[in-house]
Amino acid sequence: MKQQVAIKGMTCGGCAKTVEKALSQIEGVKAVSVSLSPPQAVIQADSAISMAQLQAVLSKAGNYSIEGTQAANEQKKSGGGCCG
């Protein structure tokens, strides 16, 4: 199953690598491709991964969030990514 999610808070290549590594560690994930432009991740997995689980992993990895979620709205107040 392929999932594509917009990610907020990535500001550099280091951020993209951090997000890619974090998402790759989710059980059932086969491959992850992260880009800065547009800021998104494409996830290949055995089955769909819930937005809540994706958000939890991103929050643990740093100041990243899935676009359109409450966490993304709160992030506006605190800066973004690993750089600021």
Image (tube, grey):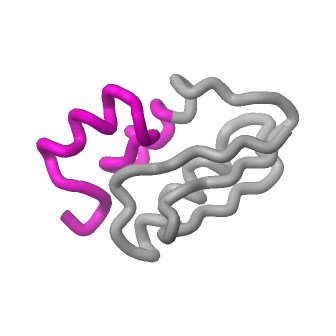
The quadrant in which the N terminus is found is top right
Residue range corresponding to the magenta coloring: 55-84
Q: Residue at x 51, y 56 (%)?
A: 19
Q: Quadrant of residue 54?
A: top right
Q: Residue at x 32, y 32 (%)?
A: 71
**Residue 47, image x, y percentages:** 83, 29
Q: Is residue 15 above or below residue 44?
A: below
Answer left or right for 50 relative to 70. Answer: right
Residue toward you, 51 or 27: 51
**Residue 72, image x, y percentages:** 32, 38
Q: Residue at x 80, y 43 (%)?
A: 2
Q: Is residue 18 above or below residue 66?
A: below
**Residue 52, image x, y percentages:** 52, 23
The quadrant in which the C terminus is found is bottom left
Q: Is residue 4 above or below residue 48?
A: below
Answer left or right for 23 relative to 60. Answer: right
Q: Please tell me whether residue 68 belongs to the stretch shown in magenta.
A: yes
Answer left or right for 72 relative to 48. Answer: left
